[in-house]
Image: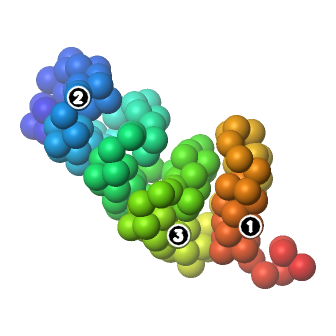
Amino acid sequence: MFISLPFCDKHLQLFVTVMEKSPDPIVRINLLIGFGDLICRFPNLVEPWTSYLFNILKDEDDSVRLNALLTVSKLISNEMVKVKAYVSEVARLIVDKEESIAQRAVDLFEEISQKGSSLYNVLCNSLVPSFIIRQGVLCTTCSWTLFSVCPPTLIQ
């Protein structure tokens, strides 16, 4: 798939389907890492499929979620994907039950804020409607992301 654009185009739907629905977490992990590489190799072809990568951040398996977050972090750091459309999926991981995932999500938001991103412009609009969860989780997530991403002058 990495060598030929037409081959990748022809088989991308199957690739994404297996990445999403495979019962084996190792298969899902390997395919999502490969998907990250495909985004770098054929960004225009794969861009419409990036929502599937962010959906894997909700996987029930901790190792799959961690690898998805690491892949997403790498892509965001290299500016291959924009986090704005999917900020709620990443922010949700700040309160993940797995400590390493929660810490990596925090690290990602700190990295984004240091790059001078204008993520705070879309943060509230995208976080609140997407969180149909406990109020405490929403408060924790919103307060942490707002104070880490927003410039101090905006918070005042």
Residue 103 can be seen, yes or no: yes
Q: What residue would you read off at disc 1?
A: 143
Q: CA distance from mark 3 to mark 1?
A: 12 Å
Q: Looking at the image, which residue is at 39% across and 40% down?
A: 59
Residue 108, how many percent across, how many down?
Answer: 48, 67
Foreground label between 2 and 1: 2
Amino acid found under the numbered disc labelled 1 = Ser
**Residue at the extreme right:** 156
Q: Position of residue 30 (x, y in %)?
A: 17, 44
Q: Tags 3 and 1 in contact by the CB under 8 Å rule?
A: no
Q: Which residue is mark 3?
A: 106
Query: Is residue 36 visible in the rendered structure shown here?
Result: no
Does 111 sit above or below residue 75?
A: below
Mark pair 3, 2: CA separation: 29 Å
Tell me the element at label 3.
helix
Tag 1, which secondary structure?
helix
Residue 127 is situated, as x and y percent measured from the top left of the image, at 70, 48
